[in-house]
Every structure is written in structure tokens, then in C-alpha cells.
Image: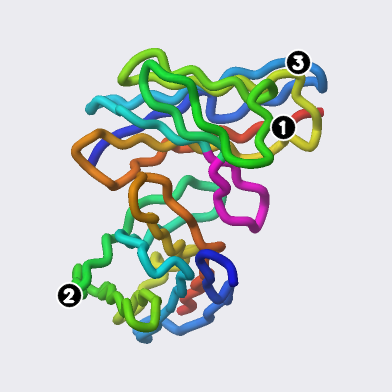
């Protein structure tokens, strides 16, 4: 099993739709989780951290399920500008190295 | 948020030459910097981790003599691709973190093309 797995997509959704991505991780001791957004040919940018209790930032909601070892990202009311690749990132215990998923591509159409 | 810069943003070089990429944290002291490489349609792959004032730790499969990393100050790390070959063409991204945070802030990346 890969350390961090994501459905590569693409997820094609119309504007205004709600879309959700999952990301599974193999190391049960992983301690920190993030969602990054990467636009085509650009560097990843932090979208949000994922807390055990779940967290929301505007239209974005992130959740962590430790029992099933996955994190999720929910995007409500999708905008055209949300089109990007969303990378799941997991930090293993003891050090700061991030492990990236391959990303899920989202395409929001008019 | 914290700002990390990289220079150059793009570089084209001939096979066999060496290329140096700089990564700077502009508004915080980066105790640790990371170098990643991303091939088209692939995820970021960590190449090495460098802590200020000490030798970099390379990931398995990354040649330390080919990818020289220097982290001489708390705001600057450099990656030198020595004797570059076409297969080294890639998007190289650095990130930085301070001792007080887990979040890594990424530079804008350097696109290297080796002819």
C-alpha cells in the first residue's frame, strides 16, 4: 500500500456544485495532515491544515478519520477558480518531512 | 503567510554543465529547508532535507554528489545540479520551515531544462 493515496481524477463538476476528495494514508502514527492546492506549473500552496476535530474555512471543510486512516476535503459552491490539483500531505511522527499524494485534479466548468 | 523565493525561475542549460538554484526565506528564519523535484503529472518527491549549518540528509536514490545542497544561513539554501543531463530536467521546488511551525512554505519553483 502506498504511503499516501489519492484518486487522480479529474473530477469534472459544474459551478456551484459540491465536491469531495478523500486521501488515505498508511502510517497509523502520522501526526499532521494538510491539503495543498497546486495550479498548473506552479508550486503547491497551503490550502488548510486538517485537525482531528475537523475544520472549516469558508467553502472548504477538511476532516480526519484516524480509525479509517483517511482525510477528506469538501468544497461547496465550486467556483471556476477552484480548478486545480489538490494535494494531500501527511507528516509522519518525529520529523518534519512531508509525504505528498499524487493529487486530485478538479475541473470546474461554467 | 511566510514568503519563500527561488532563483532562477527558469533555466536552460547544456548537458554537462552545473546549475545552482537558490532558495531564500524572506521574512522568517528557516531552520530546515527541503528540496523537492516534480516531474510532469507526478507528485512532489522529496530529494533532501537540510538543516542550517549541517549536512543535508538525502532520500534514497538521490545522489548527494550530483545534487549538492548547502544551507549556510537561516535564510538561504542552495541546490547545485552538477553535470546536468536531460533526465535531470524537472521542476525543482524548495520549501522552508522554522522551528516554531510544522507548515512548510514553498518557493515558486525552478524549471530546469537540460538540452
The residue shown at (36%, 77%) is A72
Q: Name the one closer to the observer, A39 or A1.
A: A1
Residue wearing tag 1: B113
Measured as percent of width and height from the top left, residue B1 is found at 23, 42
Q: Secondary structure at mark 2?
A: loop
The reply to the same-chain question for discs 1 and 3 is yes
Q: Give the residues in magenta.
A: B36-46
Q: Secondary structure at mark 1?
A: strand
Q: Where B15 sits versus B105, above or below?
A: above
Residue wearing tag 3: B17
The reply to the same-chain question for discs 3 and 2 is no
Residue wearing tag 2: A53
The residue shown at (81%, 18%) is B16
Residue B76 placement: quadrant: top left
Q: Where B47 sits versus B73, above or below?
A: below
Mark 2: give few (<14), some (14-19) or many (20+) Cα within 10 Å. Answer: few
Measured as percent of width and height from the top left, residue B85 is found at 80, 28
Amino acid at each position: 500500500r502506498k504511503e499516501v493515496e489519492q484518486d487522480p481524477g479529474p473530477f469534472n463538476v459544474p459551478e456551484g456544485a459540491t465536491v469531495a476528495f478523500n486521501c488515505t494514508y498508511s502510517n497509523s502514527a502520522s501526526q499532521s495532515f494538510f491539503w495543498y492546492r497546486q495550479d498548473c506549473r506552479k508550486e503547491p500552496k497551503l490550502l488548510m491544515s486538517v485537525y482531528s476535530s475537523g475544520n472549516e474555512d469558508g467553502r472548504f471543510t477538511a476532516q480526519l478519520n484516524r480509525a479509517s486512516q483517511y482525510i477528506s476535503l469538501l468544497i461547496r459552491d465550486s467556483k471556476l477558480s477552484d480548478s486545480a490539483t489538490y494535494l494531500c500531505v501527511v507528516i509522519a511522527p518525529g520529523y518534519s518531512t512531508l509525504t505528498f499524494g499524487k493529487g486530485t485534479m478538479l475541473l470546474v466548468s461554467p | 503567510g511566510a514568503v519563500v523565493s527561488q532563483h532562477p525561475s527558469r533555466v536552460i542549460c547544456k548537458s554537462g554543465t552545473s546549475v545552482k538554484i537558490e532558495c531564500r526565506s524572506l521574512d522568517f528564519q528557516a531552520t530546515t529547508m527541503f528540496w523537492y523535484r516534480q516531474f510532469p503529472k507526478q507528485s512532489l518527491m522529496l530529494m533532501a532535507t537540510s538543516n542550517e549549518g549541517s549536512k543535508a540528509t538525502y532520500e534514497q536514490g538521490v545522489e548527494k554528489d550530483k545534487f549538492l545542497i548547502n544551507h549556510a544561513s537561516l535564510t538561504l539554501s542552495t541546490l547545485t545540479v552538477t553535470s546536468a543531463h536531460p533526465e535531470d530536467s524537472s521542476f525543482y521546488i524548495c520549501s522552508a520551515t522554522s522551528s516554531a511551525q510544522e507548515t512548510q512554505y514553498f518557493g515558486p519553483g525552478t524549471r530546469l531544462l537540460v538540452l
